[in-house]
Amino acid sequence: MNASARQHLILTSLCVFAVAWPDLALAAEQAGQVAANAPAPKPTRADYPVIAGVSARTLAWGLAQMHLYLAAFVLAVPLFSIATEFLGVVTKDERYDTMAREFMKITMAAYSLTALVGGALTLALFVFYPHLMGYLLKVFRGQVLVYALLFLLESVTLYLYYYSWDALRYGNRKWFHMSIGLVLNTVGLTLMFVANAWAAFMMSPAGVAADGAVTGTVWEATRNPLWNPLNLHRFLANIAYGGAIVGGYAAYMFLSEKDPKSKAHYDWMGYTSNFIAIIGFLPLPFAGYWLMAEVYSYSQQMGITAMGGVLAWLFIIQAVLIGTIMLAANYYLWCGLMRTDRGALYAPYVKYIAVVIVAGFLVWVTPHSLILTPAEVQVLGGSHHKLLGPLGIMPAKNIAVNLMLVFTFLSFQMFYRSSRIPTVSWAKAGNMAIVALYIVGCLNIIGAGIYGYITPTVYKVGASVPQVATTLSIIVFAVIIDVFMLRGAKTTTVYWGRMSERSQYALFVLPVAFTWLMGLMGYIRSSLRTHWHVYTIMKDNSAEAYIPTIGQAGNTITAITLAFMAVMVFVFWLSRLGTMKQAAPPQAAEAGGVVT
Amino acid sequence: MLANRWIVLAAALVFWTVYFHTIDRLVMNAQGLPVGIDLMPK
Amino acid sequence: MTFLRVMAFSIAVLLCFTLFAAILPQVQSDPPSEEEGPVGALDMAGLVAYGEKLFSGKGTCTLCHNDLGRAPDLLKLDLAKTFADRLADAGYAGKAKAETGAKAVEVYLRESLLDPSAYVVSGFGKKGTNDKVSPMPKADAAPIELTEVQVAALIAFLQSKAGMEPSVAVPSSADTVSETASTTSEDSEEEDGPATTAVAALEKFSCAACHDIEGSAAELGPKLNGIADRLSREKIIESIVKPNAEIAEGYEADMMPQDFGEQMRVSELDLIVDYLSKMKN
């Protein structure tokens, strides 16, 4: 990179920082400038607008969830678009740049839809929950204007990034193009961070007195206890989600295309998307754990409502969904072994990995309390099964999920190795180091879990952090050893496109399960507030302040998911439509037709 | 060659055991959960 | 064809998740009902029973005080011994030290409910605070918001469970009625004083909820626009204070609240009647 490009990058980075932290400007605002120190409003049931029998909660829920699905998608895609573009520059492989541009192309329509649904959501919230919105405006003041300005900036950078692709294709201009991409991503992330602040404030308010009177700056309200855990969790989940959806697109195109070159292209795209989804997915349990830990730290009651009280069963559903995702991602990787001739060498190990993944899934799904009738409780002699009951509590669950993550990574590592033969002299020793790493790491995970059973509760919970650290260690060190060991490795051909049809269906399971899982998590997040708009500050007195049953929630989530699937089909179809060209009709003279 | 491989495995097993035990202890103590060398609560 | 197959597969997967959610135990969690408070006189047995209801109800005690180890399992422990141990603990330096017997237990329990960090039982403190800070929320603050009567009921329940005669005072009927009134009025926009304008008074008593007044278009009761043409001032007063005395044609008896006479101040009634007396067509 020469001086000019470097200057561009520095200048852009400076702009990025100026743009990315608008709250620093607002944080300087004195608390004394706050207009009114009135407490939070206390609307009565009659104060909530009732319009044409519309269920306000369902409407807001539907729009909010749809907006989140779309927003997560449009935030994630530029992230891996710029990463892929960068890879293309570093490896000088044209294919990466083509794919990066394709990622952006297929999502263009989604941006305006995201904004549209966001606008509809805002309208619905102001119409049906005017008191809450009025209060939130009082708390967050000028930040909402900043939010609006950021949307403008996002549109500008998005169009610039996409439409300048060919004009800024090589050399210095390429770096300039990537700078635009960097600004786009920063603006997008800031948008998410701002919106996260409002959602997190409703759960763990800060910068306000016990009666709701605004006492702090906007920055204090923004930086509430759950803000950063939510930021991290959503950032990672967006990446995983975006990867899953693009993977679904690639899988569909693979199945539809007949031309081998196209099939190869889409197979590769599917593999890359699955890889991105797994990368985002692997650290998610850690981010989720941090989020729950912060929930417990802020309010033990809220934490226990989530995991031990009314919402406990939701986490079993979550376990089913995550288990499904892991099985699908792994299955796809195992099928991927058929792309290389050496893949068959690793095939015998697949069944052991499958056993671990399925066993982990089963353990993870096992609840502590069983669904029993009183008669059954009598026969069983209690509400917990003596042998299986203990599988329902945290130590067992953590063993299961961490082992599942480790073995998923192993599946990936096997595929990666199947096309590379190490040529370094210490290859055998290196392999032994990796084998030992896996063995000791897994024993450590299991050991920490057993430790949780024999120590007091606080230690039980604390033992999950070493487990995650172990999983991360295994992944990090395995990658490091591989990077060195595979230097100058002899690569064998990867026959992109040589995949079975059913393997692609695994790539459809991912986005469907992810979407439904996000909907479920939204239901949990909202329900954690129980009957409060802003937890402990502003009560929800509407007719729909109750937490709906899981069955009702499931139906709502499925309906919204179906709507989202329809939207995405439309978005992808549009991008295809954009490339279709109708053939011009033959000349009238040649056809011998009469000119009318 | 063969002897080398198993020696490396043994050494690696010891190395990783020490590594994981150390981070286990560090992580537990960092969380405000005092544990001794045997990882049992103090 | 591919499209249909993919869609069918995706929908099938979705239905599996939906079905799974539908077969699990279905629980609808309602906001705590403000009518929970007993109105009227309570005896000690009633207070203890109320406390027991609160323990797993509005108090949300069972969320943590159970056999999972997060907080002392109050329902299983030998409470008489437990309370004695707590009060005798060298680390305890709270308000109950100044009392003896059942009164000491009462003071200890009230302190535990309203100021949990005053004394934390060994091993149950927040991680990293060396048992100095309790993870227990204050029972009278949001989100639990127990009233004084409810706190007394819980204490009575726990003392009774410990096998001692509860030392809390049984709340009088005046106490419980005012408790219910204050908890329900918390939900209604009751200002701390009489309404000072007619419009405020009409709003306070929600007249527009049932009567069409100034375009509220409610139809449960007769339209109030033009009422001055139909009723004399005395009749308007009677309609408010004794609604069943005379029912307008086409409407039913027992629809209008019968207790405006007790709820309204004379000044508020005056404002309303003056206002309505001017409403001619």
Image: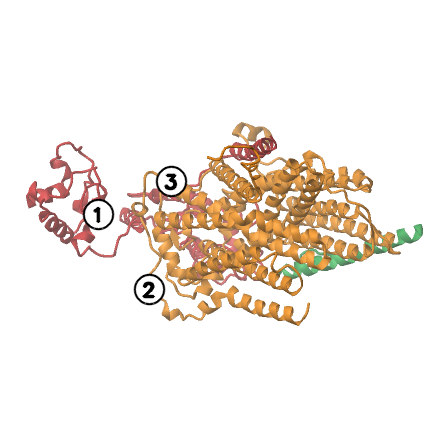
Residue A200 appears anywhere in the view: yes
Quadrant of residue A2 within the rendered picture = bottom right
Residue C46 coordinates in the image, percent (x, y)? 36, 41
Q: Which residue lies under the disc numbered 2?
A: A36
Residue A280 coordinates in the image, percent (x, y)? 63, 51
Q: Which residue lies under the disc numbered 1?
A: C205
Residue C215's disc is: none
Residue A55's disc is: 3
Amino acid type indicated by mark 1? Phe
Instruction: Check disc 3 and report its element: helix, strand or loop.
Output: loop
Tags 2 and 1 on a common chain: no
Look at the image and give the colour of chain B: green
Instruction: Check disc 1 and report its element: helix, strand or loop.
Output: loop
Look at the image and give the colour of chain A: orange
Assign the N terminus of chain A to one quadrant of the image: bottom right
Q: To which chain does the residue with label 3 belong?
A: A
Residue A365 appears anywhere in the view: no
Look at the image and give the colour of chain C: red
How many numbered circles are shown? 3
